[in-house]
Image (cartoon, rainbow, N blue to C red):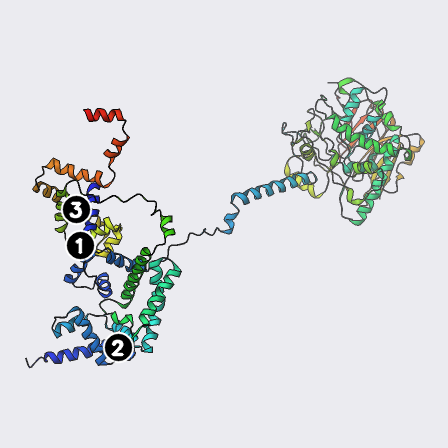
Amino acid sequence: MSAGPRPEETGALSVRMLFEKSGGERYGLTLQAFELILDQVAMKYLPAAEPRQRLEFCRDLKLEELALARACAAGHDAAWQSFLTRYREKLYDIARGITKEDSSARDLADSLYADLYGTVERDGKRLSRLNFYMGRGSLEGWLRTVLAQEFVNRYRKQKRLVSLEEQAEDGVQFSAAAPGPTSPLDSRLGSALDEALGQLSGEDRLVLASYYLDNRTLTEIGRIVGVHESTISRRLEKLLKGLRKQIMAGLVARGMNRGQAEEALEADVRYLQVDVSKKLQENRPAAFQQDKGSG
Amino acid sequence: MPELSNLLRERLGAAESGAGVHPDADTLTAFNEKLLPANERQKIVGHLAKCVECREVLALSDPHVADSPMQPVIKPVAVPAWRRFFAPALGLGASVAAMAVIALVMLQSPHKQGPVSSPGNQEAKVIPSVPKPLADQERGAEVNQPLPDQPAAIQSSHVAEPAPSMSNVNANNVNADDRGRSESLKAASNVSELKANKDSATKKKIVPVAEPVLTASLPGRDFVNNNLFAVQTSNVVSVVEQDKKDFPAHSQTAAAAAAFPANGADKLTMFSDIPANVAAGKSDTGILTPIPPADHAGFITKWVQAGTRTLRKGTLSPSIRAGTLGSSALGGPGMFAFDLQRRQPAEVSATPEKAEAGGLEKSGALSRRALSSSTLRFQESGAVQWKVAGGKLLKSNDQLQWVDAYPAASGGLEFFSVAWHGSDVWAGGGRALLVHSRDGGLTWEDIKIGDATGSIVSIVAGSLNVQVRTADNQVWSSADAGKTWVQQPTGTDR
């Protein structure tokens, strides 16, 4: 083992190398400060990992951007100058791409700038949001994600604070009463479906949720998953066929014959859409209803 | 599988209630950038399958979405300038403007447009602005004062003769061979003065010289717009009447007209039997040009309306050509130009400007004979002019002073017609007397025309070909400058 350095020496060397790689010295960071940053990151994501694993984990971080962000959070002017030069306009563009409207984008970006600079102080230190950047992804991507989170949070707040006039304009006050909790015609159908969904992989469930719940396009789903949209299309078709087969099998396993299982799936349409039979029964002439009832 | 889709929505939504702790922004960014290890990625995917908020954040933070530009504002595409001309509104405006321009050109065209051939006969010749022949001018006067013994057919036929145009007014000064036309000569002398002034201002100005038009025999009178001619002729006559007191009494008109045979349909058969071009054998069909409409009558109409003879140079209008007259008077080219009987002589007596002669030659509308030097004459400033007035043969170098060019005629000889071609001058008088001068009137020689009888009332002279018509309705022609004469059959002979 004399040929190789000791693990402590390897770790110390690696931290220095990572520090040099990050260029944190340009932004006024010291090696000790940088090592503390790396320890913080490693403790968050690999709390139980060994030092070697932590260093390997930290080696894959965006070290240069991590050093910049933390230097900005520490209040180094050179870091702020560099940050503003590199991300100021880009941040506005990202916000504009999210909000699709210029004034809202300015508002959103400016609020994030305030958080990034740290307008709130705790124990004499500014609390900058850049301190939460861990360098796992690019700083630009992190800013984009933070902006998206801020936009979603604002949207959810605004949804909760919709005025009565806006509700009236939206027809909420005059909308029909929400139907009461209705159960499927047969509880066996729900349990069979849940069982089938539970057997799906996370990615298949993500595809289904993005397609059926979020109404994402195949292209958007393909970008999230990282495959081509045609692959998503084929996967969706395959998933539906497999789900139907599994549901049918589950229904049969739950005591239904095949005809009853088919009827249970078709009955779901009547249940979810409109109770057509009920409506038709209401509109039928009384004499016919009497005949129907007598018959 | 719509039913399964609805069911899926319900169950998937219900399953999202227990999504758990959301991944931080760093992890989502790393997931988005495909930087997470596989095991951690599966965890994030599982969370995303249950968390609509994280899916929303992930979708918004997608670089393709976040970097996409704002929703484009639909703006009208800039239309190139040249395409605006094809816009409906501009196109309509352009069309209207084009029609207005065309209308302006059409209104101005009578002064510029060349003659057109008759559509009905390819051999027909269009006589552009016919200078007023002496006999025609007289006939204009005879409309208001018809001779008692003159048949109505003659009168109506005379009305159908071409009316004077501006160039015809000049022709009054030249070809007035009638003593009874002295009033028109006087009026014309005023025009001559005006013209002389104009010529002095523009020495190079080419003025068409009056050329007697050989009156063609009309097979019928249905083609004659009597009303149009009557109006125009009355205007002319009214001018004459207005200044009658200044003019000497006429005598030649009545005498010449009385000498014409009154033989029904062939009353206007002057030169009708003369071959159009004996020597060359060219086309022998001509078109009689109507008079211009009232608005094209030039200064004459204005003169009458003003009741004064004060003339201004600016009021002189150019000659009106046959094609333009037909177009402007009756709305179609050639409608008012009618073909004369075949084998009738075609004569073009004048052309408005020399510059247009080339164009006429090229146009093909006129025959070569019509454009020949014998029929196209241009009076340049200072050229010798000839006329017959009071039975005397007069010539002038400036159209202001006229001198007796044949003193020997004072012995009782009366001249009725004159024609000249360059220095060759032919003058016809009573008793079939024809004199010829080869040197512009310095020396004269008498020409014996066979057995011709009657006064020579009309002469058409070329370089070699000469045709004369007598009051006895005899037509004689010579193809060798008067050495030998051949009597041509007249319409009555056929």
Quadrant assignment, res B378: top right
Q: Categorize mark 3 by other alpha carbons within 10 Å: few (<14), some (14-19), many (20+).
A: few
Question: Up-down: is A25 above or below A227?
Answer: below
Q: Which mark is residue A203?
A: 1
Which chain is mark 1 on? A
Q: Position of residue A222 (x, y in %)?
A: 23, 54
Comparing labels 2 and 1, the label whose residue is closer to the camera = 1
First reached walking from the N terminus: tag 3 or tag 2: 2
Q: Do the residues bearing badges 1 and 3 touch, measured as CB atoms within 8 Å?
A: no
Which chain is mark 3 on? A
Q: Position of residue A118 (x, y in %)?
A: 31, 72
Regarding residue B300, the answer to whether it shows in the image is yes
Q: Position of residue B6 (x, y in %)?
A: 22, 44
Q: Which mark is residue A23?
A: 2
Q: Position of residue B157 (x, y in %)?
A: 76, 24
First reached walking from the N terminus: tag 2 or tag 1: 2
Q: Amino acid at mark 1?
A: Glu
Q: Which mark is residue A238?
A: 3
Quadrant assignment, res B340: top right
